[in-house]
Amino acid sequence: MSEPRDNFIGEILVEHGVLRPEDLERIIAARAEKGGSFVDVLLASETVDEKRLWSTVATEMDMAFAEAIDVEKIESHLVADLPIVFAKSHRVLPIGEDPAGVHVACANPFDMAALDAVQTIVGRPVVPVVVPGEVILDAINKVYGRGEGDAELGEKEGAQEEELTDLIDVKDEAPIIRWVNSLFFEAVKHRASDIHIEPLDRDVAVRYRVDGVLQTAKRAKKAFLPSIISRVKILSKLNIAEKRLPQDGRIALKIAGKNIDVRVSSIPTSQGERVVMRLLDKESVLHDVSDLGFWPDHYALFHGLILRPHGIILVTGPTGSGKTTTLYAGLQQINTPDRNILTVEDPVEYDIEGIGQMHVNPKIDLTFSNGLRAFLRQDPDVIMVGEIRDRETAEIAIHASLTGHLVMSTIHTNDAPGALTRLVEMDIEPFLVASSIIGIQAQRLVRLLCPKCRELYEPEREQLVELGIDPDDPYKPSRKPASPLYTAGWEKLRPLVPLVPGKVRLHRAVGCDFCLGTGYYGRTGLYEMVMITDTIRTNILRNSDSNTIKQVAKADGMVNLREDGARKVLTGTTTVEEVLRVTHEDAG
């Protein structure tokens, strides 16, 4: 505090008989000798207690004073964007609101910087309410510690404090920096995969993609957009002066001891610059194959493929369908000291110990094809290629598989049979496709029903038919496959839900605090696997279209995406709506 303000507080206390003049002189002298703020020295001297100090100042300043805080009346949205470390450090806490503004409990009504920061964060005028500091700290612990949302992280309060300390220096940095950093903290807290910062006509909207679905998280005044974008650009080492061209960058963050890699993309729009950030937890993706949500038949097929000594395994699906996660899980499964495993990726998303990983760089002509060609001189057993995008990459991958290597990669098609015709469209000879590909897996991600609030209901008959479920015998085993390649998986199938005679009961989403009102928590995969049987190989050589190959694959024993989804609906894993949302190409 400045000297004039110290004198002002001291004069108020003397005027109200709380402090004797000689005590005031002694406190001022002690402060000059030891340093520190006037209030800290005063309270340390135990001449005046904190409650009497600030109640007296509040009376003189015509401010409200409260001895206690009713935590139960503090609504969650008031503190949602206020970092706990900032609140504790400055002893401030929003406790209510009315037409005049947000009422903020503060231990020091002269800490204008803190009150201004709170006003920026809540986006409304603040009305100070003087409250003893210990009372505020106790209320902060209770407010930030209650509710299921905090429990989702599995972190104690001390760990939450560490999370923010990893990200921000709350004492020295500007409010806009803390506001931007809070986006990352809240995104990690709510398990978001992406953060969207979108300029609108009158304000700026922030949306998080949680379990594959966008949700509005917070808003800011339009005037703050340039500062928000500039802060993100500084973190990602982009050109803050360039506002006319798209830019891409990356940010490395540490939150609660976790290393978070953030991919940043900014584009100019008519309303201002728009930023999308993808968050990658470098540890969360390293799942075991058994954790991916495979049904027993698909697990047996995929596990059998990754143990093959050579051939090409393709994983297909749209962006965000978990293809990389599946490939990494497969690599983890076979990552043993007797295998030399190499990957070429764009970019390397997750580091895996014991595997050589290369990041493509088109600027120096380090492409997928060039990286893959170099790998063949590194004596590999298994090669993972991030994506087959062109003929050259496909040809080298096929050459590698035919010379005794197992190659795993992704390709963009809607279903598994379509990947075969896509390679032929790249001008790859059909006989090379037929002789090198050993299996193709298509996949989608669906949201898992929240275990705390899902409920049973009796679906309409039409709803079951649309999903491909027989209303009269919904739990019958899948058809017996014609091809022996599918038999091992088929023999493991058993009905997992007991049949209630005359009734089909499914689960549906409801919504609760645990799942943030969505009815869903987490995601799992839907899969279809095409094994390259003799009949499939014959159709590839005939240049058959993807629809023909799909029908042949179903006759062989392939379970398509919608059928796999139906099985997971019957077991209460997900809902009819989720399966229909991601499997529209299987309709009919």
Image (cartoon, grey):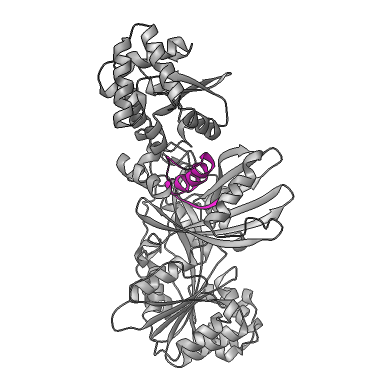
Q: Is residue 11 above or below residue 168?
A: above
The front one of 359 and 284 is: 359
| Magenta-colored stretch includes residue 384 | no
Q: Residue furthest right?
A: 270
Q: Residue at x 60, y 38 (%)?
A: 220
Q: In what quadrant of the picture does the N terminus appear?
A: top left
Total marks shown come to: 0
Estimate the x, y position of residue 467 in percent, counting from the top left.
55, 55
Q: Is residue 103 above or below residue 473?
A: above
Q: In what quadrant of the picture does the C terminus appear?
A: bottom right
Estimate the x, y position of residue 270 in percent, counting from the top left.
74, 50
Q: Residue at x 48, y 88 (%)?
A: 374
Please give left or right for residue 80 compared with residue 424 in the image. left
The front one of 385 and 163 is: 163
Which picture quadrant has residue 145?
Answer: top left
| Magenta-colored stretch includes residue 186 | yes
Which picture quadrant has residue 486?
Answer: bottom left
Residue numbers of the magenta segment: 168-195
Q: Residue at x 46, y 46 (%)?
A: 520
Residue 326: in sight, yes or no? yes
Estimate the x, y position of residue 80 in percent, counting from the top left.
47, 35
Q: Is residue 547 above or below residue 122?
A: below
